Structures are given as C-alpha cells and as structure tokens.
Image: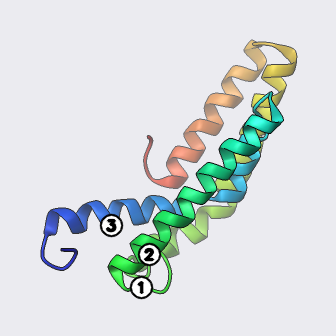
Amino acid sequence: MFQRSRGFRLAVDEVEKSLYLADMDVAEQYAGLVPDRTAGERMFALISHEHKRTARAILELTGEASLCERFDGLRRRFERVRPMVNQANRWQIDLLRQTRTKGRSEGLNRPLLMTMNCIAAGLGWTG
C-alpha cells in the first residue's frame, strides 16, 4: 500500500517527519512538570512506548534503517537548528516551572511566548 497509494504515502511521510522531530529526552523533561510525579512518569512511559512502536512500524513500511533517510534536506536543516530548539525547550520548561512556582507574572509571559515562537520556527510549523 505504501508503494501504490500516494495519499497513504503522504500520511506516512508526515508521521515519519513528526517522529523524527520529536525528541524524547525533551519530552521527558516536560513530563517532569506534572505535579504528580508518578502520573508524569507513567504518562511519559506511554508516550515513549508509542513513539518507539510507531517508529518501528514506519521503518517497516518504508524499508528504511532510520527515520527520515528519504528526507535529507529536512534532516540537515533540523540537525543544524536542533541545539537551538533544545535550548528554547529548556528555557520554556524553566519558565513554566517558574510560572507554577511564582504564579502568573507579566515578567514571564513575554519570554514564555518567545520560547513558543522559537520552538515553532525551529520545527518549521506550529501544532
């Protein structure tokens, strides 16, 4: 089906790109923001498991050895900006932690919005 259906292939391509861009180390840090640590760890374990499971299925469908082998331009561009995206994620996690500790503050709103903009720009889309 992957070889014969352009629509199916397009859907698989987009899932593959999303999996490639998703950094599970960063996701684990976001899960650490959940007030109930056990719930956060459990939720992250489910997300991580589904990420691995879906990546295996995509690789089986495409015949690739690793995600996004077919998208060299995306890989090169993202590897160039990945350190900046990861730094923006770390800032955002810290700002979210501060917001939860100190309460909503006008001083934190603008930097938090800026991290959202940086992350979206680095990933190449919002959503």
**Residue 24 point in image, percent of width and height:** 66, 58
Q: Secondary structure at mark 2?
A: loop
Of helix, strand and loop, which one carries label 1? loop
Measure the C-alpha gap from mark 3 to mark 1.
12 Å
Residue at the disc numbered 2? 68
- The part of the image, by quadrant, that contains residue 71 is bottom left
Q: Which residue is mark 3?
A: 13
Q: Position of residue 117 (x, y in %)?
A: 55, 38
User: 37 above or below 56?
Assistant: above
Tell me the residue at 56%/66% (across/down).
52
Residue type pointed to by label 2: Cys
Label annotation for residue 64 = 1
* Residue 124, position as x, y percentages in the image: 45, 53
Which residue shows up at 84% across the image and 26% down it? 98
Q: From the viewer's perspective, is residue 73 above or below residue 40?
A: below
Q: Is residue 93 visible?
A: yes
CA distance separating discs 1 and 2: 8 Å
CB of mark 1 within 8 Å of CB of mark 2? Answer: yes
Structural crowding at the residue carrying mark 1, measured as other residues with C-alpha within 10 Å and reported as few (<14), some (14–19) or many (≥20): few
N-terminal of the two: label 3 or label 2?
Answer: 3
Q: Is residue 111 above or below residue 109?
A: below
Residue type (three-letter) at the residue carrying disc 3:
Asp
Q: Are marks 3 and 1 in contact (CB under 8 Å)?
A: no
Q: Amino acid at mark 1?
A: Glu
Cα–Cα span, label 3 and label 2: 8 Å
Q: Residue at x 39, y 79 (%)?
A: 60
